[in-house]
Image: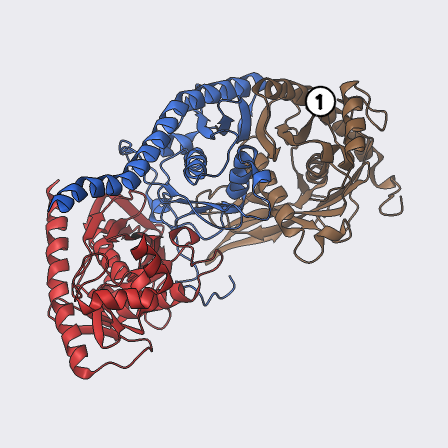
Chain colours: A blue, B brown, C red
Amino acid sequence: MPLDHRRVPGPEESQAPLLFVPSGAKESEPPPAGAAHRDPTALQPLFEFRRAPFSGRGARGRPSDREPELSLALQEALEPAVRLARYPRAQVDVSALLLQDGGSALAAALCAAGLALADAGIELYDLVVACALCRAPSEGEWLLQPSEPEERAAAARLTVALLPSLNQVSGLLGSGEGGPPDSWAQAVRLGLDGCQRLYPLLRQSLLRAVKRRTADTQEPSEREEAVEPPVVTA
Amino acid sequence: MASVVLSEAEKVYIMHGVQEDLRVDGRGCEDYRCIEVETDVVSNTSGSARVKLGHTDILVGVKAEMGTPKLDRPNEGYLEFFVDCSANATPEFEGRGGEELGTEIANTLYRIFNNESSIDLKLLCINPRENCWVLYVDVLLLECGGNLFDAISVAVKAALFNTRIPKVRVLEEEGGREIELSDDPFDCIRLNVDNVPCIVTLSKIGYRHIVDATLQEEACSLASLLISVTSRGTLTCMKKVGRGSLDPESIFEMMETGKRVGKLLHSSLQTVLDEEEKLGSARKKVGFLG
Amino acid sequence: MAAGGFRTVEPLEYYRRFLKENCRPDGRELGEFRTTTVNVGSITTADGSALVKLGNMTVICGIKAEFAAPPVDSSNKGYIVPNVDLPPLCSSRFRPGPPGEEAQAASQFMADLIENSQVVRKEDLCIVDGKLAWVLYCDIICLDYDGNLLDACVCALLAALKNVQLPAVRINEETGLAEVNLKEKTALTVRKEPVAASFVLFDSLVIVDPTAEEEDLATGTVTIVTDEEGKLCSVHKPGGSALMGAKLQDCIGRAKTRHKEVKKLLDTLIKSVEGT
């Protein structure tokens, strides 16, 4: 490893304790605890996907482990939605930061990045909605929006991104144990269906944000009007 | 990525051709260009292959080296991919220009090999937790003429087929284990490549999709679907590439086409590899003279 | 609208008007901290975590524990590796790429603080002398940058360290390998409780807990870290305009009261977490 003076160095090599759990004493998975904390927004040349070093189970993630691939996936899924032609000589930067991986991280980042673009007032053809799927190892059923333990045990994983009102697939990334095309096609259908169901929720949250913002900007002026008359009479 | 600039008229010409199932070079939508494969072209590797697909020229070398197994998989060896986009291929790769494409291709290769069935990694283990074979797969891009991913995956499969790993024995001695290399240089392990997938890239042009796009055709396509198919017709990886989007129905069609074309690709590749194998050491090597 | 324009065109003069009246544009007094919010254990993939907010300033600290061989020169010690990350998403003043100057300086400050204050003794992190030790990777990421980075980082680190649960480890005598029991977890021993208080110098005035805007306008900063006995762990004054000794004494006094405030907050928080 090249010496990096810009970070505080630790030992050259360290291992996650999870690898040393005797195989007999398998840990019992805790029940998934609500929504994970993820916070994607903001700026960097075009598209960036980063994981916080503590976001994953097991070993601490080193910088740039799988990030380039996911950044590219983020870019390829979002680019079809943005009206880039409207912003000549400008740069739209999108960066997603994964704080805790509770499964379906890429899908969540895609949804969040799509929402952030819309919230920033960037002209879009459509919102981006994404869903993750995984195939359980034995029975071969596809599961929608898997949790982290499900994802880890899965035989195959897939992330689908949809532009819902145009009905166009903007992103598709999946791999795993081989399956017939029919099985993958079924997964894509299931994923698209999931995206359509998620769409109203995302729209609602955008609407709420807009309402809140307009309320924030209007309130002070209204208050002024309400205050002024007594001043005048006085 | 290496690309060409086309005028609108040229694009329309190509698109109309694709619509009629007759492409600029006379192929149909589901035809590959002629593929040339030669294995064992670099003598100081454990296995190597050179693949020419139209103007695309790829050299792959596999080196087997002794390493320590990964902590989470103590009973397996592993593969490492490195893709070098040589500046000879296109001026765009000069300096660090090829790095991004190189990591993208390497990541895709990791992705299609990231399952238990493609290569028996347990075969590469020598001593659990202590020693295993690491296969360094080095891909060198000599020339880009479109459809890099497919050509690279064919070359990787051919090189893995050609790979010979020396047999070693583990001697239990007091004070530790010792590894002894077999004296006979022909005593070696071969890898079973039956389940190694090949990539089929389907580029969407107009309302149709084509396989094995040339650089000109790639410039006409906004989005492609990359799928990896095994010889039995199962899909191990799918990925949308490019800055456009795809219609759900066309994705399903592309997957079926990919399966059909992929199976054909595998069977013809396997025949060629077997034929070359039969010629044995008497074979006249073409190498870089051809 | 007029006030907004004044603030943009003459920010320094705008501030001075407020300071003359002994208050600040956000309504605080000169010696007043922003509302401090702390949340611990929100990240379950980390072995300990804390989120700290000072007004809009938000930092998150996640701690991952891993095994490593102890350093050669001190075989009975483990490692604590603090790193402060200022990603471009927290403020437009940071560019992507490797850590910039401010992040590097903050990382080094945290490393020195851990070493000097002995918040966690590195000897406590040793599992088997010369063989195996814990490494605590403390990654502090800023999510929203609004001034006073160091106070937020120190508070987040302390809260996260108090939240760390390490699994029991024993060495299997046959194989010589470590065996981890995830069911049996113990809290990390936190020996000292350093709390930081930062000040900026504004003409002859000293202002506590600056926002990003105030930091940019001020002529110097001072950060004072005290522990629970009121001892000084660190006095950090990186350049800037000179400061009278008496003023520094005032700052130290304010830092001590700040310690009591933060300690009270953390104690009630830890108690409520243990209660559940």
Quadrant hosting residue A138: top left
Residue A85, image x and y in percent? 60, 39
- Residue A194 in the figure: left or right of residue B214: left
Residue C38, image x and y in percent? 20, 50
Residue with the mark numbered 1: B261
Please tell me whether residue C88 is drawn above or below residue A57 in the rendered image: below
- Residue C63 in the figure: left or right of residue B146: left
Q: Which residue is the extreme one toward the front?
A: A233
Residue B153, image x and y in percent? 68, 36
**Would residue B103 be seen by someone viewing this image from the given angle?**
yes
* Closest to the observer, A170 or A69: A170
Residue for point 61% across, 39% down: B109
- Residue B199 in the figure: left or right of residue C175: right
Please tell me whether residue C62 is drawn above or below residue C84 in the rendered image: above
- Residue A52 in the figure: left or right of residue A64: left
Q: Chain of mark 1?
A: B
Residue for point 12% across, 59% down: C261
